[in-house]
Structure formats: C-alpha cells, structure tokens
Image (cartoon, rainbow, N blue to C red):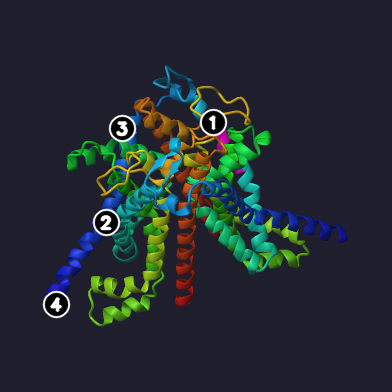
Amino acid sequence: MIQANTSDKIAKAWLWLSAVFIIIALLSVLGYVFIRGADSLSLSFFLDMPKNNWREGGILPAIIGSLIVVSIALLFATPTGVGAAIYLTEFTREGRLTRLIRIAADSLNAVPSIVFGLFGLALFVFYLKDFTGGPSLLSAGLTLGFMILPTVIRTSEVAMRTIPFSEKMESYGLGASKLQTIRNIVLPGSLPGIITGLILGMGRAIGETAPIIFMVALNPVIPKSIFGSGNTLTTQLYYLAMEGISMDVAFGTALTLIVIILILNYSTRALNKYFSRNLRR
Amino acid sequence: MHKTIDLENIIKNILLLFSITAILILSLIVIFLFNEGLPTFQHVGVLDFLMGDKWIPAENLYGAFPFIISTLLVTLGALLIAVPLGISCAIFLAEIAPGWARELVRPAIELLAGIPSIIYGVFALVVIVDLIKISFNLATGETIIAGSIILAVMILPIVISISQDSIDAVPRTYREGSYAMGATDWQTISRVVVPAARRGIIAGVILGCGRAIGETMAVVLVIGNVEKLPLSLLDSGEALTSAILLEMGEAVIGSLHYNALFCLGIIPFIIVLFLSIISSRLVSKRVSRFG
C-alpha cells in the first residue's frame, strides 16, 4: 500500500510538471519575442517605409499588404461559410450530402499549408492569371480564403445549432416565413458564434506564410491595387530571418504579429463573455 | 405567397452552392496537385522518385528519398517529445488540476495554438539551434532535432485538447467504481480512465502527427536544408515541405522541376488526409460508444 501511495505522488508530480512545461514553453516564446522586438516597436515603425534594405525604417507596406490579404480572405469566406452553415442547419436533413460536405470541410482543414501554396500557384498564378494578375495580393487573399473556409463553416454551424427549436417554432407560429425566421431568429441568435469564427479565421489568415509565399515578394512599395504584388507581415518575417537581412526588424515584425494575435484572442474571449452574460439576462 | 416561395427556392439554391464550395475546393486541390505533379512520371519512374537518393534538378535527377526520411525523422522526434508531455498535460487538466491551474493552463494552450508557425520558426532559429549546437558540441545546430523540438511545441495543443475531450467524456461511474475498490488516483487514471479514453487520445496523437508532417515554416528555418540522407536526429536534413518552399522560386512554371515539386506535395497531402480521416473516425466512434 505504501508503494501505491508513493507511485501516486510521483505520477502526480510528473503531471504537474508537464503543465508547468507548457507554461514555460509559451512564456519563453512570447518573452523572447517581446524582449528582442520591443526596441523596434514605435508608431514610426508601423507608419514608415523600410529604409536601407529593411535594416532601418518601418514596415508599412507589410502592414497594408496583410490588411488587404486578410480582407480579401474574409470577403470570400464570410458569405460562403455562413451561407453554407445556414444551408446545413436550416434547409437540409442529415444525409449523404451533409456528410460529404462535412468530410470535405474536415479534410480541407487538414490540408498542409504548403499544399495550399502549390494549389494557389497553379490555379491563380498560372491558369487564372488574366483575372488575378498572376502573383498578386488577390491570388494570396483568395488562397487564404479557401484555407479558412472550414473554420467559418464549422463555427457558424455550431452556433446556429444552439438556437432552441422552440424559438424557431414560435416564429413560424406567428406566421413568419422561413427566410424571415432565418433573418430574425437564427442569424441574430448565432451572431456571437459567427463573429468568433470569423475572428479565428482572421487570426489564422494573418499568421499563415506557406500558402502565400509564392505570390508575394519582398518589395518595399505600398501596394497600388489588389492585382499587383505586395508583401505581408509573415512573408517579410520569413525573408528577413531566412536571409539574415535584419534580425531587429524581423523581431519587430514578429512582435507586431503576436500583438495582433493576442488582441484577436482576447476579443473572442471578451465577446463570448459579453454575449453569454446577455443571453442569461 | 407564391412570390415568397420562389424567393425561398432561389436562396436555397444559392446556399446549396455555397455549401458545396468546400467539396469543390478539395476536388480542385486534388485535380491540380495531380495534374501538375503526375507528368513527372513520364520522365522519372515512380520507384526512382520515391527511393532515389539524388535530387539534382540540373541533371534531371529527382529522387525524393532523403526528403521523405527527413520528414519522417523530424516527425518521429516531435512525437517522442509531444506524446508523453501532451497526454500528461491532458490528464492533468481533466483529472487533477485545481480550478486556478486549469484557468491558467487552458488559455496558455489556446495561445500556443494561435501563434503563427513562422514565429515558432524564427524563435527556434535563434534560440533552439544555438542550444543544440552548444549542448551536443556540433558544427551546426541546424539539425533534425531542432525541428523536432519546435514541432513538438506546435503540436502539443492539438494532442492536449483532443485527448482532454476524450478523458472528460469518460463517465464518472468508471472512476467511482475504481475508487470504491480502494484504488489511488493514479491507479484509477492509469488503469481505468486512460484505457477508456484511448481512442480519443490516439486520435489526438494522429492529428498531431499529420500536423507535423505538413508543417513548413517552422521546419525550413531550422533543419539545415542539405540534400543528403540524414542518419540520426543530430544530422541536418531537408523536409518535403522545405524542398517545395525553397525550390519553387527557381522552377520554371511547366518544367519538369516544377512538376516534380508538385509530386513532392502529393506525398504529405495524401498522408495527412489519410491521418485526418482515421482520427475523425476514432473520435466519432468513441462518442457513440459512451452513448
């Protein structure tokens, strides 16, 4: 019996240790990037053009590039993903088609990011270059949009399934049509979940590098149109670190990315808290 | 009345179109990957491609074996670290963590999952590579093991969250039965709870494995990228994904080199898809088993 108690204590100590390790891993990555990047961060770092081959100056082109690319991804994934979720929850029963859609979405979610890069290269840069301008911000944005679609479908669907059946029945009972019920009951009720999904997708899109690496170049100009080339925070970070151009600006860029991710992460949390409080009323 | 029904039908069809977009995109990925990749085999035999150990595009030699071995080694190393740690942390969260510790660790895991892979790569390049170099006294720290360590950190959130879900799903009566027989916490965990949750735990490990095989940015920055066969975790190597990333810039669109790089992409694509299907089957069966 003493033996069982001793092994119980040792095992628990190990379990605690594993959790402590997770915290240490997180803190060392975050802490290191904060310490190395903090010196670069200033308003002019965000608003200035790069100078002296990225060794000085700011990262404005990459910030604008990232904003454009993520906006395009969301413009594609929001209507498509939310629309798909409405269809799956309101217009159809579980069956072969819904199963197929779910398998496709899960598989799409698992596809390695570099494979999205190859796909985007072949489809948008090569075959559709007359429409997309070849290696352009539009090509990059659409590739990312494809990539975050499963996230948006899944989170929207889960949110819509939490709407109580009785609320929909009340709406129909008052003589509302299906479309009115969707507009007045389903969409408002699932809005927090949908927005959370969009923020998750945004975080994923802004942090991805491999899918868009073949479509952007390290180019110190403000992008003029979505059909032209540009660069993003992640791809700039890759080139700066890989080619050892400037580690200081690289860590400044990394810190910028982490701050954006932290803000997005915090806002989903705050959003969930706010809405769950309001729903309880 | 008639008009609204028509509108409803139109909207229904538009929404149907949206919902099959996912199927459409997946099919397009398969079509393009194979359409651009398979022409390689008109010039290079399938076996030569998979087992050949020389990759020299200038001489039209395309043997992907060193890349395949590098990817397998780096993934294996990552699993050796992440599986024991991840399962332990999942058990910790599900079984023994007090409320405050759970409140601390869960958000940490979420954040770990949200950090972009390129940042892990840059961190590993400047920190882990140096640590490896010093601690093993090597000429260069850019080795397979450096990639494994950073990949382990990246796949921990997946392993933990899926394992924890399945441990949480084990009915409380299982535990009560074990305690009633005088078992300690650890005996209950190791002989009752973990075996009951094993399907979900395996699913988490498989999904983490898929993620490691497909990861590009964190690996390319730290494993050295030399096109030779790695013989141990302390050698340099070049993963499948790294080769695609590094060489696509030089490949002329439509050339044999370009086709061969798409072929390299087919390998992780098929493996990862296969792993994802297995893991989702494991999880869905688990749910039905517990009712």
**Is residue A70 found inside the magenta-colored segment of the image?**
yes
The residue that appears at 64% across and 68% down in the rendered structure is A96
User: What chain letter is assigned to the residue under label 1?
Assistant: A
Dots 3, 1 in contact, CB < 8 A: no
Mark 2 falls on what kind of element?
Answer: helix
- Dot placed on the residue nearer the N-terminal end, 2 or 4: 4
Cα separation, mark 2 vs mark 1, equals 39 Å
Cα separation, mark 2 vs mark 4, equals 26 Å
Quick one: B101 or A256, which is closer to the camera?
A256
- Tag in front: 2 or 4: 2
Q: Which residue is mark 4?
A: A1
**Is residue B147 found inside the magenta-colored segment of the image?**
no
Q: Which residues are magenta?
A: A63-74
Q: Which residue is mark 2?
A: A18
- What's under tag 2, amino acid-wise? Ser
- Dot placed on the residue nearer the N-terminal end, 4 or 3: 4
Farthest residue toward the top?
A52
- What's under tag 4, amino acid-wise? Met
Give the image location of residue B34, x and y in percent: 56, 51
Label at residue A65: 1
User: What chain letter is assigned to the residue under label 3?
Assistant: A
| Residue B58 drawn above or below residue A8 | above
